[in-house]
Each structure stands twice: as structure tokens, then as C-alpha cells.
Image (cartoon, rainbow, N blue to C red):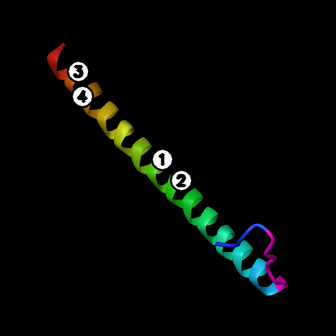
Amino acid sequence: MLGRHQKTSGEETTLIKVQWRNLRTWHLHEKKRLKRAMNKRFRQEGKKNALWNQVSV
């Protein structure tokens, strides 16, 4: 952690930016993956409920 008056070199700044971008990219991909999985599950449950409603009617 940098102190109040310390400065980062250009190389350090670049490394920090690259790592931050990588973390952000991973986070967004993980979010999309979880959303797709959730939607898939909802669709499957919807189909099951539709079939159950047809059988019980």
C-alpha cells in the first residue's frame, strides 16, 4: 500500500491497470455465466411446470 506522498512509477501504474482490467473482465464473464445458468434453470422449471399443469388438468 502506498503512503500519502508516494508516487507509482509508470511501469507500476501499467501493471496495476492491467491487473484491474483482468479482474473486471473475469468478474463480468462470471456474472454472465451465472446469469445464463440461472436463466437455463428457470426455463427448465417452467417446462416442468407446464407439463405438470397439462397432466393434472
Query: Quarter holding the C terminus?
Result: top left
| Residue drawn at 59 percent across, 67 percent down | 23
Residue 29 falls in which quadrant of the image? Answer: bottom right
* CB-based contact (under 8 Å), mark 1 and mark 3: no
Tag 3: amino acid? Gln
Which one is in front in this view, the residue at disc 1 or the one at disc 3? 1
Q: Residue at x 29, y 26 (%)?
A: 50
Q: Label 1 sits on what residue type?
A: Lys
Q: For the residue marked with disc 2, what is the amino acid? A: Lys
Residue 14 in the image: state x and y as whole percent. Answer: 77, 80
Residue type at mark 4 is: Leu
Contact (Cβ within 8 Å) of mark 4 with mark 3: yes
Dividing the picture into quarters, in which one does residue 44 lie? Answer: top left
Residue lying farthest to the bottom in this orientation: 11
The mark nearer the N terminus, 1 or 3, is 1
Horizontal side of residue 57 vs 44, given as left or right: left
User: At which x and y percent is residue 30?
Assistant: 50, 59
Nearer to the camera, 23 or 40: 23
Quickly name the residue at label 1: 35
